[in-house]
Image (tube, grey):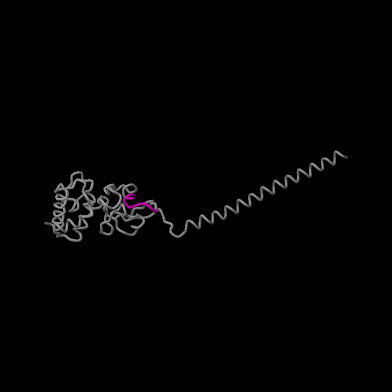
Amino acid sequence: MADQLEMLEETDKSLSRRKFIKGVIAGGAATYSAGYLFRTGTVRAQSGAAGSVERLITLNVNGQERRVDVMKQETLATTLRYKLGLTGTKMGCDRAECGSCTVLLDGTTHYSCSVLTHSVRGRAVTTIEGLADADGTLHPVQQAVVDGAGFQCAFCAPGFIMSMVAMVDANQSPTRAEAAQALSGNLCRCCDYNKILDCAMSAADYTRGV
């Protein structure tokens, strides 16, 4: 009889422990599920928060639509060189001083090292790679620079050429002083400014068909 009572007590204890463990597991699962739901809601809310920036964007570069993954703090110079492979855009000072990274945005010169890529969506970006015709015919400005051998190391040449293109688009008959003013945002480390200005004047002549 005593043995039967002991067996019943042990059975009750085991059932109680089993119920307790099940209760703990069930409670933990419920807590985790609730936390997951709230966490998911928070993440969704953050993804659509004000100021968030879409990373995969479309740019109009040299007349082509280019789809590219861009970080919100990324500059246009970085995107052009390292994402799109347009290495004609040079990075010199990287602080909007030397002009080697000059590109055209809707026909106007800009330092691409100081322009955020996200800000140029919907605008026409032109780099030096986009100046020549499809058959390889050089732009008149490019041809003038080739004919005049206007640069020594030529690191700064792409930026100067883009500034010359903007100059002749705005004024096909500039004076030398006006050409110097138009190119004043570009620096030449070789200081060969006289030959560069000669090329700029020739570029204007080529543009007029002289």
Q: Position of residue 64 (x, y in %)?
A: 30, 54
Q: Hey, which quadrant is residue 208 in on the image?
A: bottom left
Q: Position of residue 92 (x, y in %)?
A: 27, 47
Q: Residue at x 60, y 52 (%)?
A: 33
Q: Is residue 194 left or right of residue 43?
A: left
Q: Is residue 64 left or right of residue 144?
A: right
Which residue occupies the extreme left position in the image? 210
Which residue occupies the extreme top position in the image? 3
Quadrant showing the N terminus = top right
Q: Which region is colored magenta?
A: 72-79
Quadrant showing the C terminus = bottom left
- Viewer-proximal residue among 194 and 208: 194
Q: Residue at x 23, y 50 (%)?
A: 158
Q: Position of residue 72 (x, y in %)?
A: 39, 54
- Viewer-proximal residue among 140 and 52: 52
> Residue 78: within the magenta?
yes
Q: Position of residue 41 (x, y in %)?
A: 54, 56
Q: Residue at x 14, y 55 (%)?
A: 201
Which residue occupies the extreme right position in the image? 1
Count of numbered circles on the image: 0
> Residue 35: within the magenta?
no
Q: Hey, which quadrant is residue 124 in on the image?
A: bottom left
